Image: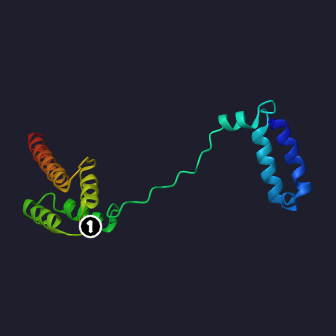
Amino acid sequence: MKIAQLRSALKILPKVDSAWSTEDGQAALAILDELLVGSDERTIIEFCGSVKISKPKRKPKPKPGTQVSTQVVADYVAELRMATTDTSVFADVMKRLRKDKSVRLPEAVAIAAEFSGSASAKTKRDAFKVIEQRRIADARSSIKREHISDIF
């Protein structure tokens, strides 16, 4: 059977079955006819072989424990930023951060990324190293700025 014959049958369908004579039925048939335009000489099997049916992609469900607690992240980032200039306060915040059970891997990585500006930590330990390295880099640049300002 050729596509041309199928298109002819589709035009008769609303007369045979009242469900296809409704507005929705007519719209569905019009979409199908539009899809078949230009393929009249092909067989239905040839046409079906050339058409890829795309299934709607589902958004993957997050794995348990992968959702980030934004409140925990925001609180720790704020504390870390305020403690940047004071070594002992920063150490206390880091100690609490390491012991806090609500800080899982996703939160630790998000805190490191937010505090440092970029992070590619794969473990909590790596995330904490990124945070500490950023603090050290900030302290060094602060000392350099002070020395330069003393020169001028």
Q: Give above or below for 46 relative to 19.
A: above
Q: Residue furthest right?
A: 15
Q: Residue furthest front?
A: 1
Tell me the SS state at disc 1. helix
- At x 85%, y 47%, the residue is 10
Task: Estimate how packed mark 1 is, as few (under 14), some (14 to 19) or many (20 or more) residues with alpha carbons within 10 Å.
Answer: few
Q: Give above or below for 139 relative to 96.
A: above
Query: In the rendered picture of this protein, how many numbered marks are placed on residues?
Result: 1
Q: In the image shown, does 133 or 106 lie closer to the viewer?
A: 106
- Is residue 137 shown left or right of residue 52? left
- At x 26%, y 55%, the residue is 109
Quadrant containing the N terminus in the rendered view: top right
Q: In the image shown, does 88 or 85 lie closer to the viewer?
A: 88
Where in the figure is residue 115, as x and y percent of width and height? 24, 55
- The quadrant holding residue 76 is bottom left
- Is residue 34 shown left or right of residue 13? left
Q: Give above or below for 44 relative to 86.
A: above
From the image, tell me which residue sits under label 1. 75
- The quadrant holding residue 61 is bottom left
Q: In the image shown, does 80 or 97 lie closer to the viewer?
A: 97
- At x 75%, y 41%, the residue is 35
